[in-house]
Image: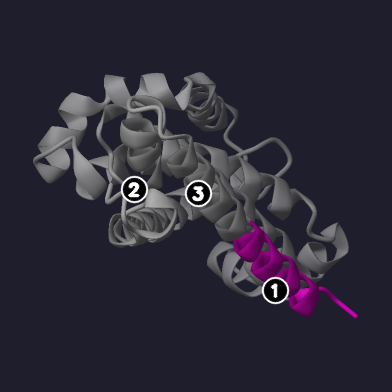
Amino acid sequence: MDPNSLLGLDWAEIGQATLDTLNMMLWSTAFTVIIGLPLGIILYLTSRGQVLQQPLAYGVLSFIVNVVRSVPFIILMIMVIPLTKLIVGTSLGVTGSIPPLVIAAAPFFARLVETSLREVDRGVIEAAQSMGATNWQLIRHVYLPEARPGLIAAITITTVTLVSYTAMSGVIGGGGLGDLAIRYGYQRFQTTVMIVTVIILLVLVQILQTLGDRLVQNYQRK
């Protein structure tokens, strides 16, 4: 850090770390939704009393989701290093952080999706079924539209969670604000760096939560 800069901080490095954090968050959120949304739909549809009721399939999927969710993220990152290297060729930096972030967040998001779908009015579902709607039509035209506010809230919660995960990824050289806070704020005892990174993360979380809340309000039934 340049001692002659404002507050003795290298703002260019902080800016790059912030961009790295945003990059990790955006890519991991996208892949989490791509994987977690279908997984959550399958969990819901195969659960007891639903159109594709399959207790065995639901039990297996539910067990896998619960196991992954129960592993602390810091441990999960270390456990999946070989898999991360296999997928992206490295376990370091922004690229190396995305696979463990997705592996940790996708099961969490899938549970939120399952919960959102359970809140869909049963009467709307039965009305669509009485008109001969197929399972795909139910998913596309009933479940997802009716659960939209809950799904948006689920994406918001997951994205905020991923922000904290990106900070933890700095422990194993994941880059971003977490890496900056550890290298300078912790290892070199530069408290100012730690405070600035925490403030940036807090602002980021507040922005994400506010945007998510407004979208939920916008899609809720008046």
Q: Residue furthest front?
A: 4
Apparent side of residue 94 relative to residue 178 in the rendered image (left or right): left
Q: Which residue is mark 2?
A: 176
Please report whichever mark, 3 or 2, sits nearer to the chain's N-terminal start.
Answer: 2
Q: Which residue is mark 3?
A: 196
Q: Nearer the viewer, mark 1 or mark 2?
A: 2
Q: Nearer the viewer, mark 3 or mark 2?
A: 3
Q: Three-letter amino acid code at disc 1?
A: Leu
Which residue is pictured at 74% across the width and 41% down the height? Answer: 49
Start-end of magenta stretch:
206-222
CA–CA distance between discs 3 and 1? 29 Å
Q: Which residue is mark 1?
A: 215
Q: How is the image coloured?
A: one colour
Q: Are marks 3 and 2 in contact (CB under 8 Å)?
A: no
| Residue 191, above or below 199 | above
- Looking at the rendered structure, the secondary structure element under dot 3 is helix
CA–CA distance between discs 1 and 2? 27 Å
Quadrant into which the C terminus falls: bottom right
CA–CA distance between discs 3 and 2? 13 Å
Please report whichever mark, 3 or 1, sits nearer to the chain's N-terminal start.
Answer: 3
